[in-house]
Image: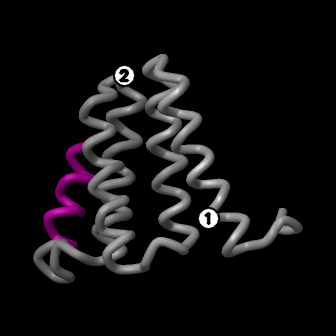
Amino acid sequence: LVQYQKSLEIKMEVLGSEHPDVAGSHNDIGNVYSNQGKYDEALLQHQRSLEINLQVLGSEHPEVARSYTNIGIVYGQAGKNEEALVQFLKSLEIQLQVLGSEHP
């Protein structure tokens, strides 16, 4: 976790706070928190990743879909299945729009 946080700090200094690589670091930190069972912290990181991705990449991008999937995973791990389903459906909708229904 400490290394991911250091990486995030460096990326923010070099690239600015609104960059896809910064969003990726928030995602990585969210995954660590999720694996530790710290779901509130994980959600904050994944939601920040989503915000950056939406702002920089637009709403129809695979990375935005990935952010929704990651948020859904955390909700599922926390036992919030309805919230998880909402996030997974958002992700699926984007993936179908961007990649098509025949994409593996």
Q: What residue did someone put label 1 on?
A: 94
* Residue lying at 38% horizontally and 70% vertically, measured from the top left: 54
Residue that sits furthest to the left in the current view: 13
Q: How is the image coloured?
A: one colour
| Three-letter amino acid code of the residue under disc 2 | Gly
Alpha carbon distance from label 1 to label 2 = 28 Å
Magenta-colored stretch includes residue 18: no
Q: Nearer the viewer, residue 82 or 46?
A: 82
- The quadrant of the picture occupied by the N terminus is top left
Q: Main secondary structure of the magenta part?
A: helix
Residue range of the region highlighted in magenta in the rendering: 1-11
In which image quadrant can residue 15 be found? bottom left
Residue that sits furthest to the top in the current view: 79
Q: What residue did someone put label 2 on?
A: 37
Q: Is residue 42 left or right of residue 5?
A: right
Instruction: List x then y, in percent, for residue 12.
Output: 16, 72
Instruction: List x then y, in percent, for residue 11.
Output: 21, 73
Instruction: List x then y, in percent, for residue 95.
Output: 67, 64
Q: Is residue 43 left or right of residue 70?
A: left
Binning the other alpha carbons within 10 Å of mark 2 as few (below 14), some (14 to 19) or many (20 upward) gives some
* Residue lying at 47% horizontally and 22% vertically, measured from the top left: 80
